[in-house]
Image: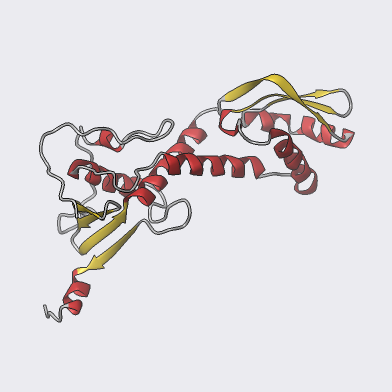
Amino acid sequence: MVLPESGGETYPGIAVSGDVPPISSTCGAPQPVRIDSEGSPPLGFALAQFKGAYILAENSAGLVLVDMHAAHERINYEHLKTRLVDQVPASQPLIVPIMLDVASSEADLFEQHEELFKQLGFSVSRVGRTGLAIRAVPEILKATDTASLVRDVLTDLAKLGRSDRITEHVEMVLSTMACHGSIRENRQLSVAEMNALLRLMEKTERSGQCNHGRPTWKEISVTEFDRWFHRGR
């Protein structure tokens, strides 16, 4: 078990990918903390790290164990999603346009939904009766098979009148970015950084699970401890 020292030292930032802020950026200024009737926030206050992978914290109910990588991954993912919603997606211009040969009905369908592609960061134009020229793609999807993705979207639009494929691809990329940008096992955190992570979890949607569906934390009540040791209260 690692018992980090607390004090007035400066805490290094935790490396993350892209525009995800380091946990230590929340350590400087006091943050509003939701406190229960017994003076403890929901996830409590950090006590120590355990086996390089978990945070042990104490709240009013008992002991809280947090998988720090899984928790940070969810925080990063939600942060990236919020930034994407709040901003127009950045586009990556292509040096050589990707030319697609499609049916004339698909080209007509594209023109009906051209604004949708623009809103998602694509620059696509019709060329003749059966051609589409992809001139720019969303920055976040630059490594995707763009031609196949556009064809699949047109297929969905023809069959269903809508398509979630681009959103699904974006979410897959964000999930990968969040995972790679999260705290790794055996990264030693200060008490301030552990508490900052706990406070961020309390403010993050769906923080009880990571992006892959694994739980991020578990609480063990004092009652359970008493039962284990045959103590009566």
- Residue at 27% from the left image edge and 51% from the top image edge: 52
Q: Foreground residue, 19 or 204?
A: 19
Front-lying residue, 2 or 127: 2
Asked whether residue 43 is in view, the answer is: no
Q: Position of residue 179 (x, y in %)?
A: 44, 44
Residue lying furthest top in this view?
Answer: 95
Q: Is residue 94 above or below residue 225?
A: above
- Residue 115 sits in quarter: top right
Count of number-bearing discs: 0
Give the image quarter of residue 118. top right
**59, above or below 77, in the image:** below
* Left/right of residue 4 with respect to residue 167 in the rendered view: left
- Taking the image as shown, residue 182 lies to the left or right of residue 49, namely right
Q: How is the image coloured?
A: secondary structure
Query: In the image, 26: left or right of 75?
Result: left
Q: Residue at x 61, y 33 (%)?
A: 143
Could you say which quadrant of the image residue 114 lies in?
Answer: top right
Image coordinates of residue 72 in percent, x first then y, are 36, 45
> Position of 130 compared to 94: left or right?
right
The image quadrant where one finds the N terminus is bottom left
Q: Is residue 99 visible?
A: yes
Which quadrant does the C terminus fall into?
Answer: bottom left
Find residue 73 and report its horizontal and vertical position in percent: 40, 46
Expressed as whole percent of the image width and height from the top left, the position of residue 90 reads 55, 25
Q: Residue at x 44, y 41 (%)?
A: 180
User: Which of 18 and 30 lies nearest the eye of the viewer?
Assistant: 18
